[in-house]
Image: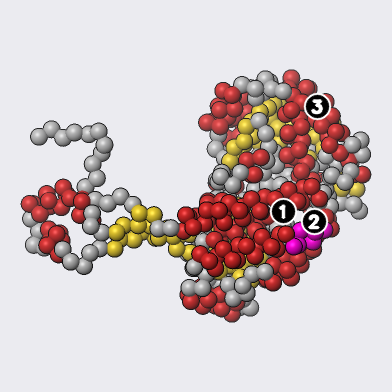
Amino acid sequence: NPYAGLVRRLRATWFSGKTRPMEYRVAQLEALGRFLDEKKQDILEATAADMGRPPFEAEFTEILLCKNELHETLNNLSRWMKDKHVDKNLVTQLDSAFIRKDPYGVVLIIAPWNYPIYIILVPLIGAIAAGNCVIVKPSEMTKNSERLVAEALPSYLDNDCFAVVTAGVQETTRLLENKFDYIFFTGSPSVGRIVMAAAAKHLTPVTLELGGKNPCYVSDTCDVQNVARRVAWGRFFNAGQTCIAPDYVLCSVEMREKLLPALHKAITDFYGPKPQESPDFGRMVGDKHFQRVQTLLRSGRAVIGGQTDEKDRYIAPTVLVDVQPSDPIMQEEIFGPVLPIVTVANVDEAIDFINSRERPLVVYAFSSDDKVVKQVLERTSSGGFCGNDTLMHLTLTSLPFGGIGNSGMGMQHGKFTFDTFTHHRGCLHRNMGLEALNALRYPPYSQQKLGLVRAASEVKRKGSCILL
């Protein structure tokens, strides 16, 4: 296997204990901070070249959000790393019982193309903080960003412990044949299944950050202009190539008639009358993705946008109506600047519609009535939830981010990423003496011994009393 030597070398380094001291972890994390500072312009240029990413969007996601994760980790790492001492029973009162935060070992991070720096660095920060050695595999779809990561990142990190592998599908398949101690994959559910199957051969634990069709329910009681702006921003940010973008709107016919002019105004306010000429609207990442989304435009009827330019990989910000649940656009994650509107009679019908489909990465609900938002939250299941806005839950390092069911498993952000890459090792360190206390558990057994052992070790339910 072409990668066996690399994995073996990193594992030997990990066994040496090099990555375990806090000072080492901090030094490597600070080096990531320098990478972001010194390569900021290169990152902006690479993402612009790969997918026409506006500088504002690139700096917000690839720089600012990464730095937030980094600073949150550096501010709290010493506390996160400490042993956590736990409650003890009567038998172990004189002993030490604690949870040791152990690194897993050699971990693999496979990243997608849509946020080529952010989706590498967030898990990498947690993996380094937890004391692991790491192999990073950036996406081959975004060539400029891949080249930047492959050429620049290794010069900031310790190459005995961290490596970047550039690989296509065939090479990644070979890479996955190796035994890793943890795999963190971000991408589509179909590839997630392949990664999980490869991991299963070695009983390797995985986090899968997958996609899905994120529903956005808009109730009849809301500020339509605000809803339109927040939904349009979330849908058309990065030209719709965001795993947590609102994928489709559920609303009544009456709300749809109010929402359409408000969405038209929001799109015009954001990108002008000709979005193709706007410096603030991105492009599809590649020809294959352009053609796939262009084909999806045949579903329903475009009432806003609908224009395409294959040479420029441009698809206009588009809103579709008269969409049927059976249409192709409702069968797969769109991952492009297209927003279908599906009409429902009321919130109950919207909830039934959401629950009849695979569990999404996020559910959005808009209403001026908090009871409606809470109703959607309580009666649906999804990786995350955001009421009265889109995307913004992602910006909080204090909230876990991850999927459920078809949208993934595991979580990241802040301490949640550290915990993902940490084995919580249950430890009990007993006194070598005081053997007389142990005699009760040794044969020959008796009912008297059992009674004493029970009294010394059982956990009683609080508030319960025993009638003698």
Cβ–Cβ under 8 Å for marks 2 and 1: yes
For badge 3, the amino acid type reads Ala
Q: Residue 5 sits in which quadrant? A: bottom right
Quadrant, the C terminus: top left
Whole-angstrom CA distance, mark 1 to mark 3, is: 30 Å
Residue beneath disc 1 = 62
For badge 1, the amino acid type reads Glu
Relative side of 278 to 76, left or right = right
Q: What range is drawn magenta here?
A: 38-45
Q: Residues within 10 Å of mark 2 (few under 14, many from 20)?
A: many
Q: Residue at x 65, y 22 (%)?
A: 368
Query: x, y percentage for residue 329?
Result: 74, 41
Q: Nearer the viewer, residue 300 or 153?
A: 153
Front disc: 1 or 3: 1
Tell me the colour scheme of the image: secondary structure
Whole-angstrom CA distance, mark 2 to mark 1, is: 8 Å
Q: Residue at x 26, y 36 (%)?
A: 462
Q: Main secondary structure of the magenta part?
A: helix
Query: x, y percentage for residue 380?
Result: 55, 34
The tag on residue 262 is: 3
For badge 2, the amino acid type reads Leu
Query: x, y percentage for residue 70?
Result: 61, 55
Residue beneath disc 2 = 44
